Amino acid sequence: MKYIPGVKIYKEPEIVQFSDIKFLIMPWRASIDEERQCIEQFKKEKPSYIFCHADVKNMLTDKSNRMIGGLEKSDLQSFKKVYCGHIHYRQESD
């Protein structure tokens, strides 16, 4: 996909801003601790949304499988919305 014009592959976390809205782009990290460190590192920039590839504890990956580990919802509370590529089932919580 990297050869498609206009497509950018994010290998490292980055803040992206459109108008006055900030997004944290957080590609897959090797551990939950690295995910938490990344979120903490970018917290000072006050992104409203996060796009990530992470497990979120107690969320469904599909209609019948619940994640037993992963980030806590409290780790993500500073964001208005969380868009997680690892979760294949649309849902809302808190």
Image: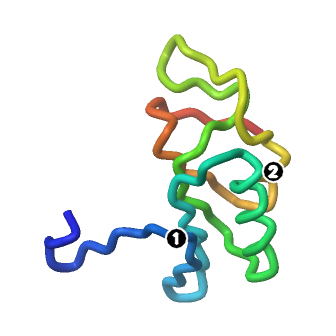
What kind of colouring is applied to the model shown?
A: rainbow
The secondary structure type at the circle numbered 1 is loop
Query: What residue is at 58 percent from the left and 24 percent from the top?
Result: 60
**Spatial separation of the CA atoms under disc 2 and disc 1:** 19 Å
* Picture quarter with the C terminus: top right
Q: Looking at the picture, which amino acid does disc 2 mark? A: Asp
User: 30 or 38, which lies in front?
Assistant: 30
Residue 82: image location, x then y, percent:
61, 52
User: Crowding near pointer 2: few (<14 within 10 Å), some, many (20+)?
Assistant: some
* Picture quarter with the N terminus: bottom left
Q: Seen from this angle, which residue lies furthest left?
A: 4
The secondary structure type at the circle numbered 2 is helix
Residue 81: image location, x then y, percent:
64, 55
The disc placed on residue 2 is none
Above or below, comparing residue 56 to residue 64 in the picture? below
Mark closer to the chain start, 2 or 1? 1
Query: What residue is at 72 percent from the left and 45 percent from the top?
Result: 32
Query: What residue is at 52 percent from the left and 70 percent from the top?
Result: 12
The disc placed on residue 75 is 2
Query: What residue is at 71 percent from the left and 65 percent from the top?
Result: 38
Residue 67: image location, x then y, percent:
64, 24
Side (left or right) of 66 relative to 83: right
Res. 56 image quadrant = top right
In front: label 2 or label 1 = 1
The residue pinned by badge 1 equals 12
Above or below, comparing residue 61 to residue 28 in the picture? above
Q: Looking at the picture, which amino acid does disc 1 mark? A: Glu
Residue 26: image location, x then y, percent:
56, 62
